[in-house]
Structures are given as C-alpha cells and as structure tokens.
Image: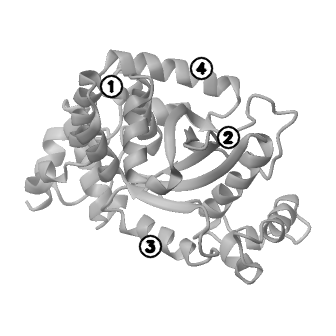
Amino acid sequence: MPVAHPSYKKFQAKYGLIPASDLTDKHIIASRMLQGLYRGEKVDNAYCNMIDPMLHDPFLNFMRNRQLALDAVNELNEIKGRNRLSDEDRLLLNLLSSQPLAFNLFLPLKWDNYETATQIFKNLFPDLQIASVTKIKLEYVPGDEYPEKRKKIDNSCFDVYLEYINVNREKGGVGFEVKYTESFSKTDFNKLEDTAPSKVRYKHAIKEYGSQFFEQFEQEYLGPRYNQLFRNQLLTHVSQHNDSDLKSCIQMVLHSANDTKCISAVKGFDQLLHRGSDFRAMTIEDLVSAVLLTTKNEAIKEVYLQIHDRYCNYSLVDEYLNE
C-alpha cells in the first residue's frame, strides 16, 4: 500500500498520492506534482506520477501525441534490438522518470529533418561549429550496431546521442545524460576488490585518458558521487574509438534548473577534470526555451509548449506547495 506524504493534502485529494519518502525535497515534490497535473485524473491508491498498468494509455507518457508515441515505439524496438533497454515499465508507466523525458525532448527534433536541432545547438554552442545535426538516437553509444567490434569499458550508454557535421566537414558527437529528479548512481567501486574486473578497467582508463582525468582523483571518480559522470566521460573516448570517423565527442548533462543536487555534482565533477575537457551541462528549461524561440515547425512548437508545462512550469503547483 502506498504511503502518503503527511502534507499537501489538497493536492493529494485531487491528483493522487505523494510518497512520504519525498520528505522535504521541494524539487522532487514539485516535479511530482507537475506530473500529477499532467496526468489529470486521480488513480486511487497510486502515486500521482504513476500510470495504472491495467489502464495503460500508450500515449500518456509521450505527451498524448500520436506521432511522438509512434516514434517512441519505433525507438523502443530499436533499443531492444541493441539490448540496451534496462526498465521498460519505468519508461512506459512512470511519468516522473527521466527516460520518457529524454524521448519527449529529443524525438520531436527529428520531425523537420533536424532543422530545429541544427539551429538551436549552433546557437547554444557556437564553439562546436555545427553545420548540421545528422543523427539523434536514444540509449546508444557509437558502435552499438557492431558489438563484436566495439571497445567496451562497461555496458554503459548515453541516454541520448546527437551526431553532427561541423563546418570543416568533420563528424562530432554529443552524449547526453538526462536528469530530472533521479540521483546519480550510488555504486561505490572503491569498495570492490582491487582485482575486480570493472575496477581494474576503470583504473586503467584513468591512466589511458590522462588528458581528461587526474590519477590523484581516482577514489572520487569511482565513488558514489561521481562514478556515473566518470563512466559517461569514458564513453566520449570509447565513442571515438568505436567510430574512427568521429573527430570529437563531449558529455552534456541535461538537468532541471531547480535540481540543486545534480548541479552540485556537475560542478564538483568538472573541478576533477583537466581544463578544456569535453564536459558540459545545460538546463532542460534552456533547451525548451531555445526550441520554442527557434522552431518554425508548428507540430514541434505545439508539443514543446506542452513539454514546458509538464516539466518546467513550476508556477502551476505554487498553490499546492504553499497550502
């Protein structure tokens, strides 16, 4: 039986339960409330961000948009074909999860042959000298199509991978780590035996990619605060090994502007890298705003207006937070 939060009774009576485990984390509580507002109808004895699997609406987690839902099904089948999907229920039934957020943010950017994606990333990151975006794939790392040939550090992949051609006709990549309310991995690889294969690989990689990492920060890289960001940073190098035509690849953390825990971890990890390393961050709000200001495609604009209210417009829940 779900355990309800002792506060926010007005909201919970109308939209569904908030977990008591959210305690006083206003970012998670407000984000969960936004999902309850988006879901609309209350489901008895269920948290406000969950879709009842018995009444599963295949359009609901994908913005109630038919084209987006169809694209999501196709993308999901491709991900399954590469053995990359870790939790299908979380994708389809959890409104708060960052996985459907990634689908919602990036799949519509394919609808106009990447015209909007090209313009917004040219504007946001002029130093990348993007001429055209050519590919967007979810749960992916370059080389996935040829698993027998790819270099592996572990079985990690990017939440979203965006590929582009720059003004010099060179191929570049951006690997996104998408966060909304979830914490980073809590695994502490320092606790493994020194002979554990994963620990051996990571320690070797820190030395191999010395242009990015400092050996004196090995414990920090392998610890629970930074290991997920560290492993993604390794993927930027592995990607270039797996695709010899890929001249550069960066990690981009995409996070909520209100997620102070994620922001703190990102800033801390950045301090553990060599200056000029291929590591960046941007907010979901900035991406959504950039699309709305840039796109000339009415279908993309319409779905992004809905995305803004569902994921960014916290003013919609002020009355319930302040009850």
In the displayed orientation, state which residue is furthest to the bottom. 216
| The one of 85 and 6 positioned closer to us in this rendering | 85
Rounded to the nearest angstrom, the CA distance separating label 2 from label 1 is: 28 Å
Q: How many labels does the image show?
A: 4
Q: Do the residues labelled 1 and 3 touch (CB within 8 Å)?
A: no
Say if residue 56 shows up in the picture: no
Q: Are marks 1 and 4 in contact (CB under 8 Å)?
A: no
Q: Mark 2 points at which residue?
A: 141
Few, some or many residues within 10 Å of mark 3 (<14, 14–19, 20+): few
Report x, y in % for residue 270. 55, 72
The answer to which of marks 4 and 2 sits earlier in the sequence is 4
Rounded to the nearest angstrom, the CA distance separating label 3 from label 2 is: 26 Å
Label drawn at residue 264? 3
Q: Name the residue under label 1.
A: 60
Residue at (74% x, 77% y) in the render = 218
The quadrant in which the N terminus is found is: top left
Few, some or many residues within 10 Å of mark 4 (<14, 14–19, 20+): few
> Secondary structure under badge 4?
helix
